[in-house]
Amino acid sequence: MAKEVMKTHDLPFSSRPQLFSAKWLFYDSTDIAFSPYGSYWRHIRKICILELLSTKRVESFGFVRAEEVSRLIHRIEAESSPRTVNLSEKLRLYANDVICRVVLGRNFSQAGDYDRHGFHSMLEEFQELLGGFSIGDFFPSMEFIHTITGHKSRLEKTFRRFDKFFDELIEERLDPGRKKTREKDLLDVLLDVQKNASSEMSLTMNNVKAILLDMFAAGTDTTSIVLDWAMTELIMNPRAMRQAQAEVRSIIPQRELVSEKDLHQFDYLKAIIKETFRLHPPVSVLLPRKSIQDVTIDEYEIPAKSQVFVNV
Ligand code: HEM
């Protein structure tokens, strides 16, 4: 059934329900994940494919990943003297630093920046607000309940924290005296798209912020959760760990560092990652979809505007 929805009838199920929380957190659902199907939906996906997440762009950030992996190793070495290390915490910092550098051009883990900006608590609040059951999503006439329960004020508070953070960064970026970074980050790319846009393809500053927010909300925890589980499974399965280590040594016997160019040779490592996804899918229920027309699947007549939840 999932294949029918996501592959065979992909187009009629391409829209997203307008969730109460997403409307508040993502600038009226103008991000990639929650925007409803239509011309804006197509427009931002095109920007993603051609500009933000093209192979060339992803490769251009290889140096960021290499530097951050190296910092991760140093952090682990620096803390391992009593033979205990909080790997989850280190992997979270790593994932956050990679996303921050790729999206915003700098990391926020130095001099207590990570705690000062409260990334972890912001993202946790985010997951909770988005992941929870919202009665207004099923009975829109009952949306007023979110004011009584305090859900709405939590949404406003979390939204304002991120919005202020992005405003400060954008202001800094638009300063003509600013020092240029090595590679264009995703904020530069989005501001370029905005500057060069034709009238039918324009992006507002709120659209830029909504897309930036998506990258944080979708890219930080997912990455660190997968890494965390992969390491946990390897620690619990010493035979697999030995085989993974043997694979590294057989492919790069002389060098100390594995580079991204070597990765295509690592079949066992790829199997470990797939197995980790299978055992511990970081997003266990996919983002809800909403049908835009009537569809018949397996003799069930599914009317337009139905919400579909896929359990991974
Ligand atoms: C291991 C890491 C990741 C996992 C497991 C993961 C998983 C997912 C899943 C399951 C979805 C929902 C797809 C759907 O329901 O249609 C999704 C959507 C999305 N993810 Fe990721 N993700 C990861 C990393 C990232 C990163 C690093 C970014 C950004 C740089 C990102 C950006 C997005 C966006 C923008 C969407 C919405 C796509 C759409 O609506 O078309 N994700 N991701």
Image: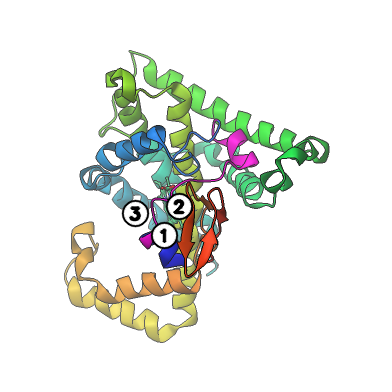
Asked whether residue 185 is drawn in magenta, I would say no
Q: Which amino acid does label 2 sit on?
A: Phe
- Asked if the residue at label 1 sits under 8 Å from ligand 1, the reply is yes
Q: Badge 1 is on which residue?
A: 6
Range shown magenta? 8-27
Specify the farthest residue to the top: 176
Q: Mark 2 points at which residue?
A: 13
Mark 1 → mark 3, Cα distance in angstroms: 38 Å
Q: Classify mark 2: helix, strand or loop.
A: loop
Front residue of 272/107: it is 272
Q: Which residue is located at x 63 percent, y 44 percent?
A: 121
**Disc with the residue nearer the chain's start (1 vs 2):** 1
Residue depicted at x 67% and y 31% = 156
Q: What residue type is labelled 3?
A: Ser
Count of numbered badges drawn on the protein: 3
Mark 2 C-beta to ligand 1 under 8 Å? no
Q: Position of residue 302 (x, y in %)?
A: 53, 58
Q: What element carries label 3?
A: helix
Circles 3 and 2, Cβ within 8 Å, touching? The answer is: no
Please check the rendered image and state whether residue 24 is part of the magenta-colored stretch, yes or no.
yes
Give the residue at mark 3.
Answer: 70
Mark toward the start of the polypeptide (1 vs 3): 1
Q: Out of 93 and 123, give the one closest to the viewer.
A: 123
Residue 244: image quadrant is bottom left
Identity of the amino acid at label 1?
Answer: Met
Q: How far apart are marks 1 and 2 (CA)?
A: 7 Å
Residue 195 picture location, percent across and down: 31, 19
Colour basis: rainbow
The residue most toward the bottom is 239
